[in-house]
């Protein structure tokens, strides 16, 4: 887990834009209860890592599951010999907590805001022009759709340039919207 910036676009017709931003963020809270439990399958590379950690062969999924059950009783092996966990949290979840940010024009970086902002920030920079460390990793449109960009890039790559281009397009299409930025624990 780490931190990522999420830009939230709110329709210009909203009476309380900050409260609307909170409502747009809500479906992506990882701690929302899922309507029913679902299977979260483990990838082969993680199974190999677990086998090495527990000093058992990677094909012995029953033994790996038995060792994991000490910490997580919901680990199982299905008939097709795949290791999975039964989950009851929001499978569309991205974050577990967040805080609103504002752009500090004097220092040139994001600064934390206490509580809910009273109004949208007018001094937002052109988000797509920011250095990598200040670039939002996600964007939520006024319809509530989440768009994922390049998360935690260390350098400018083709994926980062593509995300900058997409971000610029979203912001131009929704130029009448208010934009809030939050620092989210993802």
Image: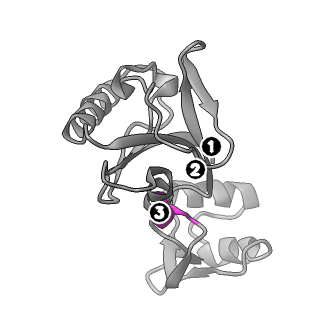
The structure residue drawn at horizontal position 50% and vertical position 78%, both measured from the top left corner, is 39
- In the image, the segment drawn in magenta is 25-30
Does 30 sit above or below residue 46? Answer: below
Q: Position of residue 35 (x, y in %)?
A: 49, 85
Instruction: Please identify, in this view, whether the residue under mark 1 or under mark 3 is nearer the observer.
Output: 3
Instruction: Find residue 186 and name its label.
Output: 2
**SS class, disc 2:** loop
Choose between 60 and 25: the one closer to the eye: 25
Instruction: Find residue 23 and name its label.
Output: 3
- Classify mark 3: residues with Cα within 10 Å, few (<14), some (14-19) or many (20+): few
Q: Position of residue 30 (x, y in %)?
A: 56, 64
Q: Position of residue 181 (x, y in %)?
A: 49, 40
Q: Position of residue 48 (x, y in %)?
A: 58, 56
Q: Classify residue 151 as left or right of residue 183.
A: left
Q: Is residue 7 magenta?
A: no
**SS class, disc 1:** loop
Choose between 93 and 99: the one closer to the eye: 99
Asked whether the beta carbons under mark 3 and mark 2 sit within 8 Å of each other, the answer is no
Q: CA distance from mark 2 to mark 1?
A: 5 Å
Instruction: Find residue 2 and name its label.
Output: 1
The structure residue drawn at horizontal position 44% and vertical position 58%, both measured from the top left corner, is 20
- Classify mark 1: residues with Cα within 10 Å, few (<14), some (14-19) or many (20+): few
**SS class, disc 3:** helix
């Amino acid at each position: 887990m780490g931190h990522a910036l999420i830009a939230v676009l709110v329709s210009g017709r909203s009476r309380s834009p900050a409260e609307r931003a909170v409502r747009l963020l809500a479906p992506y809270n990882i701690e929302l209860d899922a309507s029913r439990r679902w299977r979260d399958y483990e990838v082969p590379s993680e199974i190999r890592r677990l086998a090495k950690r527990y000093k058992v062969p990677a094909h012995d999924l029953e033994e790996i599951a038995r060792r994991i059950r000490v910490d997580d009783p919901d680990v199982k092996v299905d008939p097709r010999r795949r290791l999975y966990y039964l989950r009851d949290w929001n499978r569309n979840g991205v974050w577990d907590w967040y805080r609103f940010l504002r752009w500090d024009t004097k220092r040139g970086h994001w600064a934390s805001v206490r509580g809910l902002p009273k109004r949208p920030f007018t001094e937002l920079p052109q988000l797509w022009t920011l250095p990598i460390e200040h670039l939002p990793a996600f964007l939520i449109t006024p319809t509530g759709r989440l768009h994922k960009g390049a998360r935690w890039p260390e350098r400018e790559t083709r994926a980062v340039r593509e995300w900058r281009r997409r971000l610029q397009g979203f912001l131009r299409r929704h130029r009448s919207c208010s934009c809030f930025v939050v620092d989210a624990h993802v």
